Structure formats: structure tokens, C-alpha cells
Image (cartoon, helix red, strand yellow):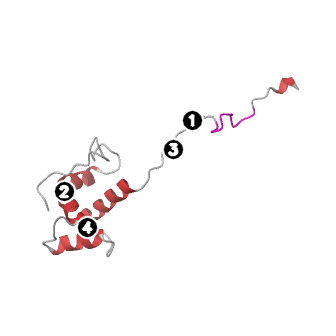
Amino acid sequence: MSGKKFFDDLNYPRGFQRSGDFTITEANVLTDKGMGMHLLASGQREPMTSDEQRFVSVCRGEVPASSVEEKVWMKYLNRITQRRHIYTICDAPARNGTPDFDTSDSSDE
């Protein structure tokens, strides 16, 4: 697709392999073929083969992803466009400044 390596420093500043979002194989596909996929998906380059035409159709949502490249690109798009939920395990005070639990001393009664 393209000879240039693909990097997304905005969403993956430490690289695809260190993100934890992609397997090593998926990260390599993104790095090696991502620039070509980006150019095709954004319309900056016209598809030249039937595989590239199918890739464009997948990006438009016309057909489901079937090849490794199509699946990886759709996973990448999903990761950068979906909001992430981060869950932590800690005891934080309530938003109004008062604790969620009863702090009264039962010996005062």
C-alpha cells in the first residue's frame, strides 16, 4: 500500500506495541501498512487493486471486515474514536465534599 511507516503520536505516543491495545502482529500491520490504509480511508489515494477497493468499502461500512488489515484498521479506528472508561479502585470522598459513609461516633448517643 505505501512504503512509509505509520505512527500516531497523538493517540499512541509510545507506539502501537506499547499501548496494550494491539497484539504484536496487529501493531506490526499498523506500523508497516497503516500509512497506505490511512491514505485510502481518507480518500487521499485512489484504490488501485480489488483488495484496496474492498478496503475502502469496509471503511465506508458497506461490507464487513474480513482480512487482517481490514480488521486491524477497524480496531484502530474504534480505539481512537471511542471514549475510554478508566476504572480505579480507591476510596474517594463524595462529590459534595461529605463522605459516603456515616462518620458519627456511636458512643456519643
Q: Are marks 2 and 1 in contact (CB under 8 Å)?
A: no
Instruction: Kindly give the residue lying farthest to the right in the view shown.
Output: 109
- Residue where numbered disc 3 is placed: 87
Does dot 4 land on a helix, a strand or a loop? loop
Left or right: where 85 falls relative to 24: right
Q: Residues within 10 Å of mark 3 (few under 14, many from 20)?
A: few
Q: Which mark is residue 67?
A: 4
Q: Are marks 2 and 3 in contact (CB under 8 Å)?
A: no
User: Which amino acid, by three-letter code, is at mark 1?
Assistant: Cys
Mark 2 and mark 1: Cα distance apart in space: 41 Å
In terms of sequence position, does the residue under pointer 4 or pointer 3 come before the other? 4
In terms of sequence position, does the residue under pointer 2 or pointer 4 come before the other? 2
Q: Nearer the viewer, mark 4 or mark 1?
A: 1
Q: Which residues are magenta?
A: 94-102
- Residue where numbered disc 1 is placed: 90
Percent across and percent down for residue 36 are: 17, 60
Mark 4 and mark 1: Cα distance apart in space: 42 Å
- Where, quadrant-wise, is the N terminus in this rendering? bottom left
- Residue where numbered disc 2 is placed: 35
- Where, quadrant-wise, is the C terminus in this rendering? top right
Mark 2 and mark 4: Cα distance apart in space: 17 Å
Q: Nearer the viewer, mark 2 or mark 3?
A: 2
Does dot 3 land on a helix, a strand or a loop? loop
In terms of sequence position, does the residue under pointer 2 or pointer 1 come before the other? 2
User: Which amino acid, by three-letter code, is at mark 4?
Assistant: Ser
Q: Is residue 9 magenta?
A: no
Q: Residues within 10 Å of mark 4 (few under 14, many from 20)?
A: few
Magenta: main secondary structure equals loop
Above or below — where is 11 with respect to 73? above
